[in-house]
Image (cartoon, rainbow, N blue to C red):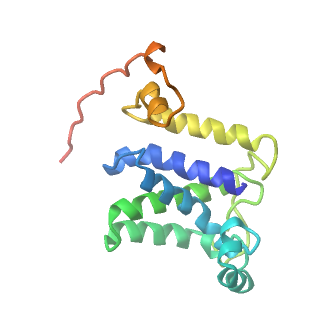
Amino acid sequence: MMAGSHVALGMAAWMAAAPHLGQPPLAPGALALAALGGLLPDIDHPKSWVGRRVRPVSDLLAALLGHRGVTHSLLAVLACGWMLRRGEVPPEYAGPLVIGYLSHLGADLLTPGGLRLAWPLKGSWALPLVRTGSAFEPLVVAALIAAAWLSLPHRPDPRALAERWGLCITCESLPLPPPPPPLPPRRRVA
C-alpha cells in the first residue's frame, strides 16, 4: 500500500487497540507514533517515504536483505511482541509504535505482493484484496478507518472535536449524535 494508507491505517489500528492496552485512543502523541510505526517496515526500501529520509540505512538494508524481507516477517512480529513484553521502552511509546508497525504488515498482507513471513525462506503469504495504488485502495482504507472509529467504546462528541479544531463556530445548533449503549460490566476470570 501507499505511504498515506499506511499512516492512516497505523492511526486507525491504534484507535482500535488503545482501549485494550489501557491508553487513550486519540492522544496526539500516540497517534503520531502509530503513524511512524505504520511507515517503519519500509525502511528496507530506498524509494519508500521513510527509506528516502534515512537513505544510507535503507540502501544498506535493501542490498543485504531486500524489500519485504526481515522487516516484513514473523521475526519482526516476534520482535514487536518482545518489545511490548520486555517493558524497557515505556508502554505509552512502545504500544503505538508496535501497533502501527503491525498494521503495516496487515495492510501489506492484503496486497498481491504479500509478506515473506518465513523469511529467509522464499515464498510469500497474501490475501490479495487490493493492488497498491489502485482506485480500490482508498475504499479499503476508509472501511478500516470507519471500523476502528466504530470500535471505540466512548466516541467523543464530533461537535466538540469540530469546535476544538476550529472547524465549527456555532456547533451548538447541530444535533447531538445518539449516546452509545452502556457497556456490560467486565468479569474477571481468575
Query: Does residue 5 appear left or right of residue 97 in this picture?
Result: right
Seen in the picture, residue 85 relative to 131 is either above or below; the reply is below
Which sits in the foreground, 176 or 116?
176
Q: Is residue 90 left or right of residue 30?
A: left
Residue at left offset 55%, top offset 53%:
10
Q: Nearer the viewer, residue 85 or 118?
A: 85
Q: Quadrant of residue 135?
A: top right
Residue 32, percent from left and from top: 50, 56
Question: Would you place residue 93 above or below residue 169 in this image?
Answer: below
Expressed as whole percent of the image width and height from the top left, the position of residue 145 reads 58, 39
Q: Outermost residue, left direction?
A: 190
Q: Residue at x 72, y 55 (%)?
A: 2
Residue 69 can be seen in this image: yes
| Quadrant containing the N terminus in the rendered view | bottom right
Residue 117 visible to the viewer: no
Out of 73 and 189, give the one closest to the viewer.
Answer: 73
Left or right: residue 140 versus residue 167 is right
Q: Give the mark count.
A: 0
Location of residue 143 with respect to 61 vertically, above or below: above
